[in-house]
Amino acid sequence: MDVLTRDRILTSKPATRSVDVRRIRRFVSALAEFPSTQTLRNPYRSRHRRQNLETYLAALLAWPYSGHLLVGEAPGERGCARTGIPFTDERLLRAGLHPFLRSLQSAVKVGGLTAESTAGIVWQHLHNCDHVPAFWNAVPFHPRAATQVNRAPTAAELVVGQAYLRQLLDLLAPHSVIAVGRTAELALHRLGLNGFAAVRHPSHGGKRAFIAGLTAAGLGALPIKPQFCAV
């Protein structure tokens, strides 16, 4: 896929995708309606982040989608909370080398070059994958804390995220769902989802176990075989 503008991404898909684009817009509009609180900041109150998410989801449906959905816990302050796109950061959306990321770079708006470790690990693992997975978070809003940049969502906050997670599952219809970390695993259990895989979160020394877990789930390959990408 060539580098596309946002308008071309949203309008250049086959007619069969037109319903998907309308559903994407309704989904993003519903996200934007949630008011930020003292404990949860809604990044989608920002028009640019809403547009970034719309662009990402439309591009995903136009790109060879692997059928996997990775579910993290919540937007990180250095990543999705700034970009609006789960498992990305500003640096990747400006200069990431994966063809899918490059297809987004002229269409999304980011304000800096902040990098997030988790996002970097994920896209480094996917660097040889033509088919890309989808990404979401159990709670789509950034948990605030007075003494922490990032914190895990509470049980009540996981409940807040359930309706959005259900909508995204319906929109993308993944054949494989992968929980990234214990919080996401708990959220999927509480949603009543059966048959999902679970991998360790790559932070705090979990990178090797995370990559091994993704590979076992059929996404990407171990570094010793960079030419292979399971889809």
Image (cartoon, rainbow, N blue to C red):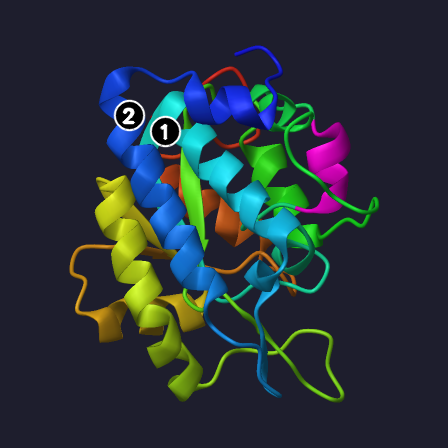
Contact between marks 2 and 1 (CB within 8 A): the answer is yes
The amino acid type of the residue labelled 2 equals Arg
Q: Secondary structure at mark 1?
A: helix
Magenta-highlighted stretch: main secondary structure?
A: helix
The answer to if 95 sits in the magenta stretch is yes
The amino acid type of the residue labelled 1 equals Leu
| Residue at the (17%, 69%) spot, across then down | 192
The answer to if 175 sits in the magenta stretch is no
Task: Give the image quarter of residue 3.
Answer: top right
Of residues 61 and 122, the one drawn nearer to the viewer in this rendering: 61
* Span shown in magenta: 89-96
What is the x, y in percent for residue 18?
A: 29, 27
| Residue at the (32%, 60%) spot, across then down | 165
Between marks 2 and 1 in the image, the one whose residue lies nearer the viewer? 2
For label 2, the residue is 17
For label 1, the residue is 61
Mark toward the start of the polypeptide (2 vs 1): 2
What is the x, y in percent for residue 113?
A: 83, 44
What is the x, y in percent for residue 143?
A: 59, 77
